[in-house]
Amino acid sequence: MTTSSPYEMTLSLNVLNHLGINLYSNVPAVISEVVANAYDADAETVRIIVDDTAKSITIIDDGCGMTAKDVNDRFLHVGYQRRSSVNGEAITVKHKRKVMGRKGIGKLSLFSIAKVVEVYTTKGGEKNAFRMRLDDIRQQIGETTGRYQPESLVDQFPGDFTQGTKIVLTELKKELINVVSGLRKRLARRFSILGTEYSFRVFIGDREVTVEDRDYFHKAQFLWLFESAESAAAITTRCRNIENQEVQDPAPLTGGQARGWLATSFSPKDLKDSDDEQINRVTLMVRGKLAHENLLEEIKESSIFGSYLFGEVHADFLDLDDAEDIATSSRQRIMEDDPRYQDLITWFTGQVRRIGAAWSKLRNQKGTKVALENPHIKAWFETLEGDTRKKAERLFGKINQLTVDDSYQRTQLFAHSVLAFEVLRHRDNLDALDAMDIADIKAVGVLFTSIEDLEAVLYHRIVTQRIRVIEKLQEHVDDDVLEKVLRDHLFTNLWLLDPSWERATDRSMEETIGKQFQSITDSLDESERRSRIDIRYKRITGAHVIVELKRHSVHTKTIDLYGQVNKYRTALLTHLDKIGKGDERVECVCVLGKEPSDWSAPRGRKDSADTLKSIDTRIVRYEELLRNARDGYKEYLDQEEKTGELRKILDSLEEDVDENLISRDTN
């Protein structure tokens, strides 16, 4: 290291650790400090170059630069009071900017992401350059009285650099993966003074960082502004998808004016960035730079509304030159006990509460509009009058306020809620809707006053689905076609044989018995195998079921059925005895297209039934199967005319759900 360096830094290890290395936690925050310094140096252009190969970050500005005296007195002077009336540097010379820097500690933040910092600066033809190494700083400060001399690099000064300051960060502590894309967005969100209108342009590589890089204006659905007409118009133009806006003048507070905007998104998921950057926040900007990352943390907004909220508040009066500095050391927050800040928070809290109420009303209106896009819901809604209609509107609004990002889930909520509304209306208990919190809508079961109500809803859905299956099967009147359709549907819809038979409950048993059944099937002669479509075992709640499905054209006898079915039944009973379940019920069903030939004899049908009953077996014919299934729901069908309109609503919503499921599965 060169001992004759003209540059010298004086500080303690405690200052280095607490105001430098441990002060910042991310690359954008550190780069922001360098950009702010460039702004204070009257720069018009800042260029940031991220070199992933060299693992370096270079920041170049065309500001006023520094002489050797400036380097020592200002840049290397930790705690330099720039805004002191003695220094007279609170306003920049060229562009008359109110400077952002105050205590001169921002440069120490560089060591939180890099071990080596090189500075090249030129002013009035004088060139200065030096290198600072974190390890050397620690060593020298630890061994001496806190003085550190950076290594001079004047002899390495780049010949093509003639104005401003260039800072090169190497031996970075953090990986540069995704730094470029994330950095652009985060810098745009940390500054409000970017662009030609402020004579201050920032580039990452060859691409300029602009206000649009904040990438959140298009997410706004409803917008509230506290701005002049001209500024409000500019913000509104960026929020190209807004459905409603309100404009007020900047708010007069004790220390000065608060301005800015608050917005709510269409959905909470809109406020989740792919790079984990938080959008669901309201930033505080002071003198064009981020001063507090999220004012919502100060008021603890815990309602559902809070998950939709984002925006910016500008309060330059929090950083007056002749007033006490109320920013924390990290420059990312404000000291909470300052009266100016407390006044701002009081105003902000009131605005959030007011906007929350307005948002609820707007979402209620939107929810009703969305619900009424379904013609059947609209027809149902138009039958309502007075207070009943208002309660339906509030119900739709509550659904629209839910943090439900999936349209399929929202459609289901509409379907459930319409039926719930009708149940409660007939029970004269619609007040339960108004008393219900928004968050409870998802658990829509709380709308029902008894278990019978919930069972009625479930019964409605089950029967609706079963009737669709029956109607589909009845479309196939041709015997051969019906044979194929039954094969596809019967074993997955055992309720066609018995309403109490739902679905298989023991897959492992099915596999075990299936293998035993196959060995029996393999021993059958050709005519026996050709006579059937399939034979299956199913384990359902309360019973073991064997179903043999015969071809429609087959002519058989009861005694033949007895012999064939009993082979499989005996195999199943033997297995159940072996596993200690020999006392469980076994039922067998033979599904035939034609009557057994012995049914034509006197008492033939009864004798056949008695014979098969001895082995817990019964016969069901194709046409009887569908007729019996339909008759099983005759009571429900008789009530369909009374509930026709409500049924149309639910059916149409079910269709929407089906379409959403298909779309979701195919995408």
Image: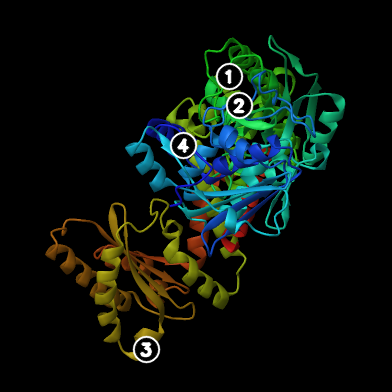
Residue that numbered label 3 is attached to: 527
Residue 639 visible somewhere in the drawing? no
Residue that numbered label 2 is attached to: 102
Q: Earlier in the sequence, mark 3 or mark 2?
A: 2
Q: Determine whether label 3 and label 2 are within 8 Å by CB.
A: no
Residue that numbered label 4 is attached to: 20
Q: Residue furthest bottom?
A: 526
Q: Determine whether label 1 and label 2 are within 8 Å by CB.
A: yes
Q: Earlier in the sequence, mark 2 or mark 4?
A: 4
At label 4, the amino acid type is: Gly
Left or right? Give the position of 256 relative to 412.
right
Residue that numbered label 1 is attached to: 325
Q: CA distance from mark 4 to mark 1?
A: 19 Å
Q: Nearer the viewer, mark 3 or mark 4?
A: 4
In the rendered image, residue 110, in percent from the top left (x then y), is placed at 51, 43
Q: Nearer the viewer, mark 3 or mark 2?
A: 2
Q: CA distance from mark 3 to mark 4?
A: 90 Å
Q: CA distance from mark 3 to mark 2?
A: 99 Å
In the rendered image, residue 50, in percent from the top left (x then y), is placed at 59, 57
Please determine whether, in this image, residue 184 is positioned above or below residue 107: below
Residue in the image at 45% along x and 65% along y? 490
At label 3, the amino acid type is: Ser
Corner quadrant of residue 412: top right
Residue 548 visible somewhere in the drawing? yes
